[in-house]
Image (cartoon, rainbow, N blue to C red):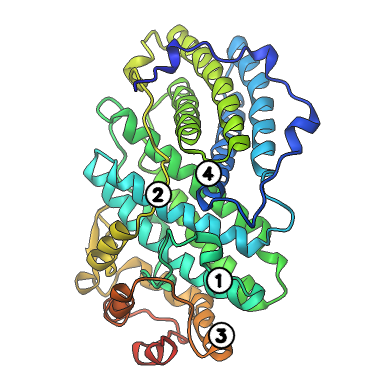
Amino acid sequence: MNFNPLKEKGLPLEKQIRTWHDIAHRKFNKNDVNCYTRTRQILMNGIEVEAWNFKHNMARVCNHEDTLEFLAQTKRIEDAQQSTINWLAPSDQSVLETTLGYEQVAVDLTAWLAQNEPDPYVKETFDFGLLEDFDHLYRYAQWAYMVHGIEPDDIVQHQTDVMIGRPTQHHHNCNILRLRRAYDKSKASPQTKVNILTVLSGEQQTHNYYGEHGFEYGNELLRETYAEIKDVEEEHVTMYESLIDPTESFYEKLLMHEFTEVCTYHNCMEDELNDDIRAIWEQFLDIEINHLKTASELFKKYEKRDPEEIIGETVVHPCHFESQKEYVSKVLEKEVDKRLAKDKGYQYIKDIPDDWASYKIQDISGKDGAPSENTIRSIAVQQGKDIVVTSDKMRDKIPELMERGLQEKSLAPDTVKVDEYKKYHK
C-alpha cells in the first residue's frame, strides 16, 4: 500500500510535548523481547540522535527566523523521542548484551539495505561494510560468553550467524581511503538517500555507544577491544557520510532527515510484534509526519521547489529486519579478501601495492597487537575453543575464509594463524 506522508494529517506540534513519566517509564523485558524489537529500538535511537544533531548544526548557520523557531521546537521533541526509545532498554541488560544487539542491527540492516539499493556503487559499499560488522559480532560474542556466560543466541535468537568475517585488524585504514564517490542529488533515488541516512545513523550511534560504555568493564583487553572497534565505526561513519552529495542545501537535508524518520518509523510500525512498542512507533510516526510537512513548506518557501521532487510520493522501506544468513554468507565467500582502493574503488588483497596507505596505519596501530585477535586467544585459553553459531556448511568454510582474509603484509604480531585457529575451532 502506498503511503504518502504529505497527504496525512500528523500530530499538531502543540500536542507533541509529553510528561516526564510518559517519556521515561517504558522498557522491554530482555528475557522475552524479540531480537528484532531490540534492533528496532537500537536503530531508532540512532535515527533520533542524528535528527537532533543535524537540527542543531543547521540552527548554527541559519538566519531565517521561522526556520529557527521550527528547529527550536522540534529539537526538543526529537530529544524527548530519543529518551523514550533509549530508555526502552532495561537496566538489567548488560553493556555486552546491548552490544550484541548493536552488531545484529549492523549486520541484518546493512544486508537488507544492500539488497534494496538501486545504485550499484552504494550497494557495493554496503556489502563492504557489512563484512566488517559481521566480524565485530563474532569478537563481541566471545566476550559476552567469557564475562557474562551469555550464549550469542540468547540475543540474536538464531537469526544471525556468529563467525569470523573480514578480520577486524584489517579494518583499520588510512581514513582518506574510506572516502567514497558521492551520489548526484539530481539523479539519486529517494531510496538511496534514505538508505544512506539510515545506515549512517546506525553506525554513528554504534560509535557513540562504544565510546560511552566500552570503558565500563575492568578487563583491559575488553576495554581495548571496544576502543579498536569504536575506531572502525568512526571509519564507517566517514565512509557512509561521504556518499551524500555535499551540494545539497540545508533545507534539502532537513527534508531528507524528516523523510527518513517518517520512513523508518513507518517501517517499524508495520513490522513490530510488541503491541506496547508498536504504539510508540505509531505515535512517533504521527509526530514526524507533522515535522515533515513543515519542513516541506520551508523547502518550498526558500528553495522554490516541490518537495516531492526530492522525496517522491510514497515512503520507502529502509529498515525491515529479518534473517540475512544466506545473503551474508554469499557476500562473505565472495568478498572476504576485498579491500579499499585509492581511486575510491575496491581491490583484492592480491592486487594491493606495497605502498598501500593503510599498511602504515595498521603497522602503527597494531604494533602492540590487535585486541580483536587476542580476544580469540583469551576464550581459547578459557574454553578450549571459540564461540561460533552457524550452520555446519559455513563452519567448514572458516579455515578457507581465514586463509583468504589473512594474506596482507601488515599483520599485528599476535595474529591468530590459521593452523592455530583450527585448534581453537572445534
Amino acid beneath label 1: Glu
**Image spot of residue 339 (x, y percent):** 29, 64
Cα distance between the residues tagged 4 and 3:
32 Å
In-image side of 188 versus 239 (left or right): left
> Mark 1 and mark 2 in contact (Cβ < 8 Å)?
no
Disc 4 marks a residue whose amino acid type is: Arg
Residue indicated by mark 2: 322
Which quarter of the rendering shows the C terminus? Answer: bottom left
Q: Nearer the viewer, residue 100 or 185?
A: 100
Residue 378 badge: 3
Image coords of residue 208 (percent x, y):
60, 52
Front disc: 1 or 4: 1
Label located before the other in sequence (4 or 3): 4
Q: Residues within 10 Å of mark 2 (few under 14, many from 20)?
A: some
Residue 120: mark = none
Mark 4, other Cα within 10 Å: few <14 / some 14–19 / many ≥20: many
Q: To which residue does mark 1 refer? A: 151
Q: What amino acid is labelled 2 in the image?
A: Glu
| Label 1 SS | loop
